[in-house]
């Protein structure tokens, strides 16, 4: 018996007798007679029982996640349609290789019936034909709804949800997505994205909750609570996945999966808090950043994966790689000589499950590495314990697929209504000169532009397919902006191709130009220039010549620069991918059936060489002739207009007993229609030991007010909320003078 097998045996024997569910450590006798403390894992008696029966092959199989491509008829990325599971491959993957997790949909959304067949068959192989009988953990990208199931309810993407600043809506979105994902037999969603969106160029900006840590972590928490509910085993809950730990969103060049250099202070202050809040909220799993940070691929960085994630943040759940990222340690990052070496590095760095996702060699090579002593058994056991714990928590042994007939609210009218409310609240009215909006209902409008008549651009990536660009998977009956306007306002709505738009404008009272971006995500969404497509700029300039008022409707995943045409527009509406109900929502907003209440969750830049967030350091006061360097965005974070007006009064800010700040403020709807307002409390630390931010969002709430009514809101801001990461890279609170700002009012106080 070699050293490893001997350790294994003694270790396993020690665990069988143990029945605590918390961290276990074990004294392990080695062949040389030495004893050592081995950090083991947290596990329930049931999980330990399972583990005691498992062979090494079972264990490395559990740590493997393959794509459905590998068990389907066809070749990877080129499967037979409709999907047919391949029985020989199922046998090989699930029974021989004992693979514990499968993901995604082989390229396009399936019907619920197809999912039912797929999930039942896969679980049947796993539980009835594989010796261990351990069910498969199926995971899917359910990003803005259950977007890989046909006809599912599709919400605004995360940046759109963030534009609503409405925590209840984020929660609802999580609840409905969990319900419809479970209605497809799938218990694990790769969502939400908790990366902070502080670089407008990044092609996944729209997958984030925007640039501010407080806004993002509040929304992330609400969404996770909606998805996981109080009990992740509930038939209406799924396990969430925090993405992508850590530092994925701010690459130097703004391009996907390129290098990020993030100082530790910034990492702690801006990029960790969303994950910390989500961990505290009970998020079950985490996906690792595909890229590299400070010169080290995150999949190989135990300081991030263990010291920070486990020891400091206290995460006990499962860590899965992102797509093919172990393999990339060889070719892209060049820190491993071959795939086997890469597996050794990643598993030893703290990875629990490898999204390989087409490579069936992973479990074979990992087994060899353990047998050769290159990966310790304790590392394997720790990961397997985490994987089985989640399977147990999801009650997969009792009910691996769920009672799929019982989900009668799937894609129901009730769910559509929720998506419509979310879409309406996600839309931002950025500009409205002379109150040109809402339009009176007798106006004739010309609707033009590349985004006027596409449902895909309203939804963006992760819609039916990865890139979201194939209309054949669109939800039946959902309308584009043009279709929704025409359905409601018939002959008053005319349209024209771009080359005929100027002539057609003659018949219209108002021009609605629907511009922005096509669909994309990840690498295919990389751009070299943030400026709006020149053809769209030219279209608006030509339309301006007609003298007709222009409403720009920007449908986009990131803020494309429009400073050249914004002055030509009377009104600007921004929709950060409002989803399937986007056409209806924009129709309602244009004609005043909905009152806009969205606010920017990012700073909308005015120039592509001036990308800076609202909470930049220093001061907005500019030095005499150097005023060019002042903060000069197109629209500020938090900006968004309404068809009514809100007045603020009675702002008070006092030191409370715990040394923080109690704030009260009254907001009054002083206009003539009901509306919703996001009350935003900013605090500025006037002098600190390191350069303070101009201001930071420290509290917010969204209130609905009838015309003429008021509400007094109270906020309590703790000393921790006012802390920053100081010179020693420690969270620091420094007493002194603070300025509290709400609306145009401000109060100074000493803490
Ligand atoms: C993305 C992840 C996604 C995964 C699985 C990756 O390319 O970065 O966000 O969850 O694929 O589809």
Image (spheres, rainbow, N blue to C red):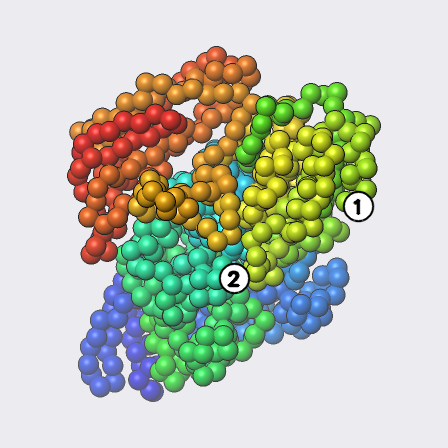
Q: Quadrant of the C terminus?
A: top left
Q: Is residue 480 left or right of residue 616?
A: right
* C-alpha gap between disc 2 and disc 1: 35 Å
Secondary element at tag 1: helix
Ligand 1, image quadrant it occupies:
bottom right
Q: Quadrant of the N terminus?
A: bottom left
User: Which residue is rendered at x = 53% and y = 69% of the image?
Assistant: 324
Residue closest to the eye, 720 or 235: 720
Q: Assess mark 1: CB under 8 A from ligand 1?
A: no
Residue closest to the eye, 419 or 735: 735
The quarter of the picture where residue 418 lies is: top right
Say which residue label 2 marks.
256
Q: Is residue 602 left or right of residue 128?
A: left
Secondary element at tag 2: loop
Q: Looking at the picture, how far across and down is residue 477, in whole percent?
A: 75, 39
User: Which residue is rendered at x = 40% and y = 58% of the image?
Assistant: 247
The quarter of the picture where residue 487 lies is: top right
User: Which residue is rendered at x = 39% and y = 31% of the image?
Assistant: 680
- Mark 2, other Cα within 10 Å: few <14 / some 14–19 / many ≥20: many
Residue closest to the eye, 338 or 682: 682
Q: Looking at the picture, how far across and down is residue 183, in whole percent?
A: 61, 45
Q: Looking at the picture, how far across and down is residue 605, in whole percent?
A: 49, 46
Q: Is residue 236 visible?
A: no
Say which residue label 1 marks.
499
Q: Is residue 340 above or below residue 259?
A: below
User: Which residue is rendered at x = 81% and y = 37% of the image?
Assistant: 503
Q: Is residue 241 above or below residue 701?
A: below
- Mark 1, other Cα within 10 Å: few <14 / some 14–19 / many ≥20: few
């Amino acid at each position: 018996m070699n050293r490893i097998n001997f350790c294994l045996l003694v270790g396993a024997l020690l665990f069988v007798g143990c029945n605590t569910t918390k961290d276990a450590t074990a004294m392990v006798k080695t062949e040389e007679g030495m004893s050592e403390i081995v950090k083991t894992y947290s596990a329930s008696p049931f999980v330990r029982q399972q583990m005691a029966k498992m062979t090494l092959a079972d264990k490395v199989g559990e740590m493997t996640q393959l794509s459905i491509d590998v068990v389907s008829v066809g070749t990877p990325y080129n499967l037979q349609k409709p999907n047919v599971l391949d029985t020989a491959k199922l046998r090989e993957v699930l029974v021989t290789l004992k693979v514990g997790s499968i993901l995604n949909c082989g390229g396009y959304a399936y019907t619920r019936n197809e999912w039912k067949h797929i999930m039942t068959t896969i679980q049947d192989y796993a539980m009835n034909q594989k010796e261990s009988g351990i069910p498969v953990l199926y995971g899917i990208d359910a990003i803005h709804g259950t977007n890989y199931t046909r006809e599912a309810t599709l919400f605004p993407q995360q940046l759109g949800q963030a534009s609503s600043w409405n925590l209840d809506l984020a929660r609802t979105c999580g609840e409905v997505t969990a319900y419809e994902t479970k209605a497809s037999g799938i218990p694990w969603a790769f969502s939400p994205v908790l990366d902070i969106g502080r670089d407008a160029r990044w092609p996944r900006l729209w997958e984030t909750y925007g640039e501010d840590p407080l806004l993002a972590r509040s929304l992330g928490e609400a969404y996770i609570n909606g998805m996981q509910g109080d009990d992740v085993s509930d038939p209406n809950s799924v396990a969430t996945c925090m993405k992508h730990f850590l530092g994925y969103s701010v690459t130097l060049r703004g391009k996907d999966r390129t290098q990020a250099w993030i100082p530790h202070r910034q990492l702690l202050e801006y990029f960790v808090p969303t994950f910390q809040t989500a961990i505290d909220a009970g998020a079950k799993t985490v996906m690792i950043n595909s890229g590299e940070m400070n010169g080290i691929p995150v999949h190989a960085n135990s300081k991030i994966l263990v010291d920070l994630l486990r020891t400091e943040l206290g995460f006990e759940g499962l860590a899965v790689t992102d797509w093919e990222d172990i393999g990339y340690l060889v070719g892209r990052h060049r820190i491993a000589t071959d795939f086997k070496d890469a597996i050794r590095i990643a598993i030893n760095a703290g990875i629990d499950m490898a999204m390989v996702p087409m490579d069936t060699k992973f479990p074979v090579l990992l087994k060899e590495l353990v047998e050769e002593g290159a990966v310790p058994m304790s590392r394997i056991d720790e990961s397997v314990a985490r994987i089985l714990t989640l399977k147990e928590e999801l009650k997969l042994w009792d009910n691996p697929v769920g009672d799929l007939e019982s989900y009668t609210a799937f894609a129901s009218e009730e769910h559509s209504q929720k998506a419509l409310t979310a879409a309406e609240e996600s839309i931002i009215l950025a500009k409205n000169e002379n109150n040109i909006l809402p339009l009176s209902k007798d106006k004739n409008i010309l609707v033009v532009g590349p985004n006027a008549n596409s449902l895909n651009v309203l939804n963006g990536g992760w819609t039916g397919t990865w890139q979201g660009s194939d209309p054949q998977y669109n939800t039946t009956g959902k309308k584009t902006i043009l279709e929704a306007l025409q359905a409601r306002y018939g002959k008053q709505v005319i349209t024209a191709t771009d080359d005929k738009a100027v002539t057609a404008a003659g018949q219209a009272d108002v021009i609605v130009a629907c511009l922005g971006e096509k669909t994309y995500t990840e690498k295919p969404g990389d751009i070299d220039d943030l400026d709006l497509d020149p053809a769209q700029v030219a279209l608006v300039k030509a339309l301006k010549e007609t003298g007709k008022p222009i409403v720009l409707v920007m449908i986009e995943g990131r803020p494309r620069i429009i400073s050249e045409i914004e002055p030509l527009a009377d009104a600007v509406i921004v929709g950060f991918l409002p989803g399937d109900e986007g056409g209806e929502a924009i129709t309602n907003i244009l004609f005043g059936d909905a009152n806009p209440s969205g606010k920017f969750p990012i700073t909308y830049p005015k120039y592509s060489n001036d990308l800076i967030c609202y909470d930049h350091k220093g001061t907005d006061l500019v030095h005499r002739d150097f005023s060019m360097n002042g903060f000069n965005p197109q629209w500020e974070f938090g900006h968004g207009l309404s068809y009514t007006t809100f007045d603020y009064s009675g702002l008070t800010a006092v030191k409370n007993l715990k040394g923080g700040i109690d704030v009260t403020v009254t907001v009054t709807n002083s206009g003539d229609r009901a509306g919703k307002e996001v009350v935003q409390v900013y605090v500025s630390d006037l002098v600190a030991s390191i350069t303070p931010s101009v201001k930071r969002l420290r509290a917010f709430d969204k209130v609905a007010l009838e015309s003429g009514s008021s509400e007094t809101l109270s906020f309590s801001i703790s000393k921790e909320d006012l802390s920053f990461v100081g010179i020693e890279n420690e969270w620091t609170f420094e007493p002194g003078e603070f300025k509290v700002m709400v609306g145009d009012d401000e109060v100074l106080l000493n803490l």
